[in-house]
Every structure is written in C-alpha cells, then in structure tokens.
C-alpha cells in the first residue's frame, strides 16, 4: 500500500476519515478448522474524501457516515467466508468505494490468530484502491451473508439480539435500479473497421429500438486520430444524447448487445474495432464497479467524445471529478488536434423504429410505430470548424 497522500487533479490532498480496530469473528481461511471454529479479524480503514462541502453546511449528506461504513466493514469481516484475507481486504475496499464521495481507500486486514506455528504478533494485508485502480471484488450486500452480532453482544438477553443484527438488504451498487423518472444519458459511438459509417448509422437505428431509451439528438460525425493502442486507422465518432428509464447496467447491456451484433472484438485493449457504444454519463450518477464507471473515467480528457458532445449540446456539463463545461474541456483536451469534422450529412433520413433488434435491451423488445427524424441545424462554435451542425429531432 502507498503511504503517500492521495491528491486530486490539481495536486491538492484529499482529507481523511480513519476508522481503526473494527473487530469481528470471521470464518475466513484455507484450513477447515478456520472455517469451522472462526477467529478474530480486525480492519483499519482510511477514507480519502473532500470534507469541505459537508463542513460548510454542517451536512452529513455531503460526507461519509462513518457509522454506516463501520457497520458494513464489520459485516464483511463476519460475512461470507473466503480463503484469503487479501480477498477480505478487496471486498472491504469495493464496499467503501461504492460510496461516490470516497475518492480512494486504504484497507488493512489483521489476522492476529492465524494458524502459524512460530510466535508472532500479527499478520496483516494492506491495500490502497481508488477510481483508477479498482478493487478485485464486488461490493458487499448484506443480504448475501449472515451478519454476526457486534462485539460484546454475545450475552444479550434472549429477544434482544435482533437489535444487533442488521436485517434486510442494503444495495450498495445502485446500477441495477431503474430510475423513478427518465434520466438524461450520453452515449459515445465510434469505430474504425469495416463500413464504419453504415455501422454507426445502424447503431443509432438500433438504439432507437431499445425499450426505455429515447434518442433526442445525434452529433455530427467526426474523424479522429486513434488515442492509445497500436497503430491503426482513424476512427469515426459521434455522440448520442438520449433519455432512459433503464437502469444503468441495463443500458450498458443494451449497448454491449449492439456492439456484439456488429462483431465487436474485445481481445485487444484500445485496438481497432467495428463499433464502440460507451455509456459516458447517466444523469448525475457517480459510481465505480468492475463493469461500469460513471461518468466514463476518461471522458474529461477525450476530445473525440467532448467535441461532438459540445456540438450536440453547447450547454453540456460533465459531472464528477475532473468534469466541467464540456465545451471548455474539449478546447483543452490532449487529443483535440486529432479531431477533424467530416463533410457528410450522415443522418438526414428519419430513423424507423418498427422492427425488432436482437440483443437490444433486457428482452430485445422495442417501441413500435415511431420515427425519430434527425435533421441538421445551424453549427455551434467549438475549437474545430464543423461542416455540419448538431442534429436534433
């Protein structure tokens, strides 16, 4: 684990909330006796956060409730048995980082009664995880395991033990929950293999057929130099603005289904591809999981996303750390000189939504009898000189 400070993009240190000595009896270990008899485990957790907004308003909602964190860490220690304390540490880190207020977390798990045949004081594993180095585990859900009583509760009178046991389900990962009202989303499309323009047109068609997703605007098409990865052809990129009643992970699966239908190969990271359909923003949700991070972690520095997005919505703002007005971010993005607009009216025809799309949405269903006419309007000013302006219904 790194002992140095955790800093934001301007080099400023985050504040820290420290919890030490969270204890629970757990049943983790590779030996059967450890699984049968259990033993004490202790966790120390340091949360790297920005406490200024909470302090300014004296508002708990703007910081981390360390009582809740302690309870959930205790639940991991006392919960589902695993073989390694390394796994316990990763799961604690994932559970803490499920709170978007936390930018990084240090976790130390102690196993003071480990089955070692020589005298020793302690065995501990320490890790640091953040938004760029995600935990190798899923966040803990209390419904997945029995939570043991808190320390000192073993002698509680019969009938009072329920006060020390958390019942019900606390879902830390909200990405499977559908919103109460439609949410604005931003999707980035791109590709550099095969008939890319035809593929991108088809992808937009297929997005309009996803139940629970309403396409509102499609940006101009841009030719962009590849960023990262091996030498490869330029990409064609566009951004789709939409509203959805799908859960974030449902939307991700719909996008991946469209990618798969067009032969997307994920074997080489940042390599050439037939189609990308990335979820950039889902409302104001800030979340990090193994399969989806919101907003997209590199959106703030990718001109091939920012410039088309600014064309489609000049007032757009990217939420989260490193965010801000999209037009301003586009003007300073490291790859801004690699973006070139195309003289191509690529979506002038109405898009029908009357045929099913395989693998789109949870069930492959779609809205019927509706068209989304996408017509050009006047250009908006950015650092590039577009030949066509944003497209809107």
Image (cartoon, grey):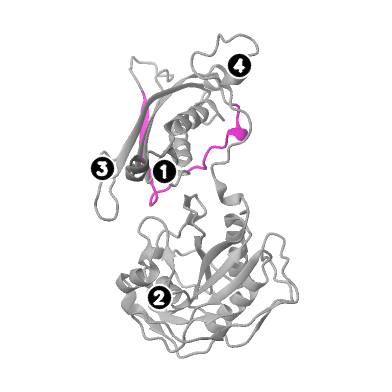
Q: Where is residue 110 in the image (x, y as percent from the top left)?
A: 39, 25
The residue under label 2 is 307
Residue drawn 40% across the image and 75% down it: 307
Image height of 342 relative to 77, above or below: below
Marks 4/1: CA–CA distance:
32 Å
Question: Circle 4: is it few (<14), some (14-19), or many (20+) Cα within 10 Å?
Answer: some
**Mark 3 vs 2, N-terminal side:** 3
Q: Between disc 4 and disc 1, whose residue precedes?
A: 1
Report if the CB atoms under discs 4 and 1 are less than 8 Å apart: no
Q: Mark 3 highlights which residue?
A: 5
Decide which of tag 3 and tag 1 comes sooner along the chain: 3
Point out the frontmost of discs 2 and 1.
1
Label 3 vs 4, first from the N-terminus: 3
The residue carrying mark 1 is 62
Q: Do the residues labelled 2 and 1 touch (CB within 8 Å)?
A: no
**Marks 3 and 4, Cα distance to the nearest angstrom?**
41 Å
Sequence-first disc among 2 and 1: 1
Estimate the x, y position of residue 112 in percent, counting from the top left.
39, 19
Neighbor class of circle 1 (other Cα within 10 Å; few <14, some 14-19, many 20+) is some
Dot 3 lies on which element?
loop
Q: What element carries label 4?
A: helix
In reply to whether residue 142 is colored magenta, the answer given is yes
Q: Looking at the image, is mark 4 or mark 1 nearer the viewer?
A: 1
Start-end of magenta stretch:
123-146
* Residue 214 position by quadrant: bottom right
Question: How far apart are labels 2 and 1 at the CA level?
Answer: 32 Å
Q: Residue 366 carries which label?
A: none
Please give the name of the residue rendered at 71% of the width and 77% of the height, measured from the top-left corner: 370
Q: Assess whether residue 134 is covered by the magenta stretch.
A: yes
Q: Name the residue under label 4.
A: 161
């Amino acid at each position: 684990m790194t002992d140095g400070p955790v800093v934001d993009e301007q080099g400023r240190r985050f504040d820290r909330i420290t919890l030490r000595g969270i204890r629970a009896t757990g049943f983790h270990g590779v030996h059967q006796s450890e699984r049968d008899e259990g033993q004490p485990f202790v966790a120390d957790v340091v949360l790297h956060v920005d406490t200024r907004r909470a302090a300014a308003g004296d508002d708990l909602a703007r910081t981390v409730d360390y009582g809740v964190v302690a309870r959930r860490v205790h639940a991991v220690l006392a919960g589902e048995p695993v073989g390694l304390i390394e796994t316990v540490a990763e799961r604690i880190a994932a559970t803490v980082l499920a709170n978007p207020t936390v930018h990084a977390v240090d976790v130390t798990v102690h196993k003071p009664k480990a089955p070692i045949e020589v005298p020793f004081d302690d065995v501990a594993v320490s890790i640091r995880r953040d938004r760029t180095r995600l935990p190798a585990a899923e966040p803990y859900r209390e419904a997945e395991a029995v939570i043991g009583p808190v320390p000192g509760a073993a002698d509680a009178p019969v009938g009072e033990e329920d006060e020390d046991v958390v019942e019900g389900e606390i879902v830390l990962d909200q990405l499977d929950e559908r919103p109460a009202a439609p949410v604005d989303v931003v999707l980035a499309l791109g590709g550099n293999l095969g008939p890319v323009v035809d593929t991108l047109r088809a992808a937009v068609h297929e997005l309009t057929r996803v139940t629970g997703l309403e396409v509102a605007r499609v940006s101009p098409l841009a030719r962009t130099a590849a960023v990262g990865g091996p030498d490869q052809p330029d990409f064609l990129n566009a951004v789709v603005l939409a509203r959805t009643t799908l859960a974030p992970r449902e939307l991700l699966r719909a996008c991946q289904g469209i990618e798969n239908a067009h032969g997307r190969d994920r074997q080489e990271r940042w390599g050439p591809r037939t189609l990308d359909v990335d979820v950039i923003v889902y409302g104001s949700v800030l979340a990090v999981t193994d399969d989806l991070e919101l907003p997209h972690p590199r959106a703030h520095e990718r001109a091939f996303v920012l410039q088309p997005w600014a064309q489609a919505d000049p007032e757009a703002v990217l939420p989260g750390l490193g965010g801000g007005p999209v037009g301003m971010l586009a003007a300073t993005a490291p790859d801004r000189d690699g973006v070139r607009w195309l003289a191509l009216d690529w979506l002038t025809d109405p898009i029908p939504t009357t045929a099913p799309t395989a693998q789109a949405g949870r069930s492959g269903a779609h809205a019927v009898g509706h068209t989304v006419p996408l017509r050009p309007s006047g250009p908006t000013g950015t650092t590039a000189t577009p030949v066509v302006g944003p497209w809107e219904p």
